[in-house]
């Protein structure tokens, strides 16, 4: 059964609150059919299963991914279901905020793209109209404005369907291209070399992963098993780094497993807060709080870097968009200047 992220977050929050009030699991699940009437059939059947002794993790499994299911399943054994459900809800809220922060990066690029489109339309339709109010050059030689305007007007008027189809096709091809994990890895590898942007993306993705590591280990899952269960949260470009750590944990321990063996070792790219969480976990024997601390720091740091990147990009994109808009009028001013010089 598929449940949208917003509905799932609400369900986990409501269920956690109901269980915290002290009612039994079957009563809590029975109440859910009134709190989420859209899914009343699922919650009615869930209440029936709970009344017959089925565990909460098994009941919720159709809604949860592997990492979330394993955390709830382990939490049932350790008696921390309410806490784990609350932390899962918090993790989903952080993920939502992280996605909003990442989306904000597109605003400066959208501004420039829109400015280019406006400039072309302005040159094709608006500027030629202005040109007719200016006396033409002497003789039959067309002005720069007339050449640019008439050419663009002709191209856009004649081929606007082809242009629209081409833009839609390019966007569709780009989205299809991004569905391939190898291509997404290429983008992330490219981002890694961009100041602010690479570090911000790494901080946010690792922050989300550290949150789930904290949840799973709090529920009683071992570090090695928690890495296996949560590694799919990371894009493959980052996942290989934590899997390299997992490969050596049993033999070397957490601290040594996070230590790069050479400059080419991919573990060198792991954020300091993550490596430090592994080291402190081994030293103190407490894993969940160390990864939770790392998650908070990385998410806050990543959001700060994204905001700085967007602010810097806006400072560049805004005057660039203004210049593009002004550039559309440039041929008009050339013709106006020519006309004035002829009058003199």
Image: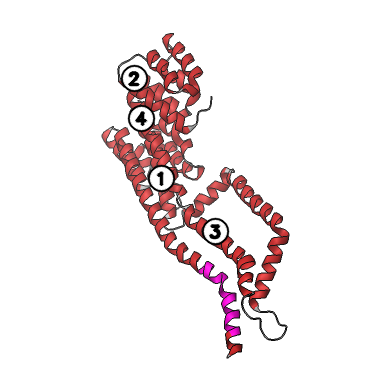
In this rendering, is residue 119 above or below 179?
below
Q: Residue 295 appears at what percent x and percent y?
A: 35, 41
Give yes or no for residue 329 being in the magenta stretch.
yes
Task: Name the magenta segment's main secondary structure.
Answer: helix
Q: Earlier in the sequence, mark 4 or mark 3?
A: 3
Q: Earlier in the sequence, mark 1 or mark 2?
A: 2
The answer to whether mark 4 and mark 3 are in CB contact below 8 A is: no
Q: Which mark is residue 204?
A: 1
The answer to whether mark 3 and mark 1 are in CB contact below 8 A is: no
Residue plotted at (46% across, 12% down): 49
Asked which quadrant contains residue 339, the reply is bottom right
Q: Residue 217 appears at what percent x and percent y?
A: 35, 30
Q: Residue 247 appears at what percent x and percent y?
A: 44, 37
Residue plotted at (47% across, 21% down): 37
Q: Determine which residue is flagged by label 3.
A: 114
In this rendering, is residue 115 above or below 248?
below
Q: Earlier in the sequence, mark 2 or mark 3?
A: 2
Q: Determine which residue is flagged by label 4.
A: 217
Q: Determine which residue is flagged by label 2.
A: 19
Q: Magenta residues, as a range?
A: 323-339
Is residue 261 visible in the rendered image? The answer is no
Residue plotted at (59% across, 46% down): 175
Q: Earlier in the sequence, mark 1 or mark 4?
A: 1
């Amino acid at each position: 059964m598929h449940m949208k992220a917003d509905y799932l977050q609400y369900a986990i929050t409501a269920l956690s609150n109901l269980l915290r009030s002290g009612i039994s699991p079957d009563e809590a699940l029975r109440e859910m059919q009134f709190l989420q009437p859209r899914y009343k059939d699922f919650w009615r059947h869930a209440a029936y299963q709970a009344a017959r002794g089925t565990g909460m993790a098994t009941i919720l499994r159709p809604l949860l991914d592997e990492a979330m299911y394993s955390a709830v399943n382990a939490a049932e054994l350790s008696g921390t279901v309410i806490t784990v459900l609350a932390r899962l809800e918090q993790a989903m809220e952080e993920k939502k905020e992280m996605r909003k922060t990442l989306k904000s990066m597109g605003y400066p690029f959208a501004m420039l793209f829109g400015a280019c489109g406006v400039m072309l339309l302005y040159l094709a339709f608006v500027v030629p109209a202005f040109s007719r109010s200016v006396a033409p050059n002497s003789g039959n030689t067309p002005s720069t404005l007339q050449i640019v305007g008439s050419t663009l007007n002709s191209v856009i008027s004649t081929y606007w369907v082809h242009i629209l189809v081409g833009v839609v096709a390019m966007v569709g091809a780009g989205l299809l291209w991004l569905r391939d994990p190898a291509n997404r890895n290429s983008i992330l590898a490219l981002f890694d070399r961009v100041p602010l942007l690479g570090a911000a993306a790494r901080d946010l993705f690792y922050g989300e992963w550290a949150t789930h590591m904290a949840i799973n280990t709090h529920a009683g899952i071992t570090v090695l098993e928690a890495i296996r269960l949560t590694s799919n949260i990371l894009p493959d470009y980052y996942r290989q780094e934590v899997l390299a750590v997992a490969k050596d944990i049993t033999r070397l321990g957490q601290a040594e497993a996070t230590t790069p063996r050479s400059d080419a070792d991919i573990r060198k790219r792991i954020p300091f807060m993550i490596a430090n969480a592994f080291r402190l976990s081994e030293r103190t024997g407490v894993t969940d709080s160390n990864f939770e601390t790392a998650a908070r720091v990385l998410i806050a740091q990543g959001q700060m870097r994204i905001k700085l990147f967007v602010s810097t990009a806006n400072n560049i994109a805004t005057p660039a968009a203004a210049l593009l808009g002004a550039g559309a009028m440039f041929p008009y001013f050339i013709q106006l200047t020519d006309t004035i010089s002829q009058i003199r």
